[in-house]
Image (cartoon, helix red, strand yellow):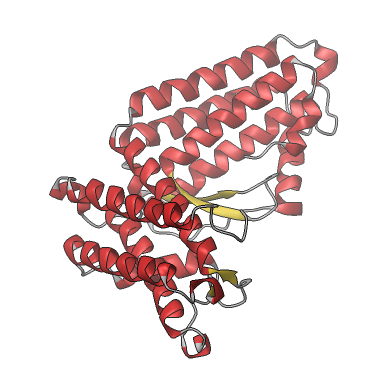
Amino acid sequence: MSDRMTSDPAAAIEGLREAVARFCRFVSELPDGALVEKAWGPKEVLAHLVFWHESYVAQAEAWPSTGAVGLPRGRFEEINARAVAASRDLPAADLLRRYRDANKRLCRLAQADEADSITLRLKRGSVPRPLAWFVTAEAGHIGHHLGILERQARRDPAGEAERLREAVDEFCRVIAGLPVAALVDQPWGPKQVLAHLVIAHELCVAQINAFLAGEPFMLPRGVDLEARVVEAGRGVPVADLVRRFKAADARLRHFGRTLDPQDVVLETWRLQMKRGSLFSTLDHIIARIEAHVRSHSRDLARGEAGNARRTPV
């Protein structure tokens, strides 16, 4: 994203006002049962947005003496977790009031004569950016979260599970249609792709089990993960891998149908199963896995198994 606001600063500020108003309206119209404490439900997302808005306001109002402002520290996941924990006993109405107030102050600062000279940071160690950048970026940030919450409000768990089952069945049909010579042990050949998907599914199920049991879970990545994938396929018949794949998928689909996705937040790989990670609600992870499986099916059908190394999970 550019370090400048859109060509029309007034339009950018109005866009932020509208984004906050839409989000507040969505939360205000939810039934009380939707605002109970969850792992990452509407109230937690609201607390998250309030925290960042108030951080920007504190920095902008202290400008140029921003050194006196305690910038957020740590990984974003840690910062967001602390923000949510701090809001646990607060009513959603109080958070909405704070959010609207912070946005009024932020928009007023963005319209001030000295707005072009104000720079903010996301957290300790982040690159300083103009206030205008935050106005535009935050509108998009709000829209992103609102879109997820709206999809969750109208989600069809059975439909999600069925689409995932269809994706897995299609992949298995592609595997079954390949010649035996294509299914030998080889680096990132079709069999290795299958092993890759087996491990990804089984680790997701294992993490959900650990989450439900309140137990710690260490998501493997990098060399450790590569080794697991290689070992899973070495000397193992394809039929056995397919059975494991379908068993893990059935368990994942069961979780998707029976659990509230906003109550299950999992860590997943960001790219290539080794370049960092992110945290997502269960429904988002299931959608990503479905897309991942379908991508591999297309690659195998085109004879491009090696793309498994370049496809995000």
* Residue at the image position 79 percent from the left and 20 percent from the top: 183
**Would residue 66 be found to the left or right of residue 97 on screen?**
right
Find the residue positioned furthest to the left.
32
Q: How many marks?
A: 0
Which of the pair 278/192 is nearer the observer?
A: 278
**Residue 102 x %, y %:** 32, 69
Which of the pair 300/197 is nearer the observer?
A: 300
**Would residue 311 be found to the left or right of residue 22 on screen?**
right
* Residue at the image position 51 percent from the left and 63 percent from the top: 132
For the C terminus, give its image quadrant.
top right
Quadrant for residue 203, please give it: top right
Q: Is residue 36 visible?
A: yes
**Residue 94 x %, y %:** 19, 67
**Residue 257 x %, y %:** 34, 31
Q: Eyeballing the image, is 292 above or below 300?
A: below
**Would residue 67 be found to the left or right of residue 86 on screen?**
right
Quadrant for residue 161, please give it: top left
* Residue at the image position 39 percent from the left and 41 percent from the top: 147
Q: Is residue 244 visible?
A: no
**Residue 157 x %, y %:** 34, 29
Q: Eyeballing the image, is 90 above or below 305?
A: below
Which of the pair 17/86 is nearer the observer?
A: 17
* Residue at the image position 70 percent from the left and 36 percent from the top: 311
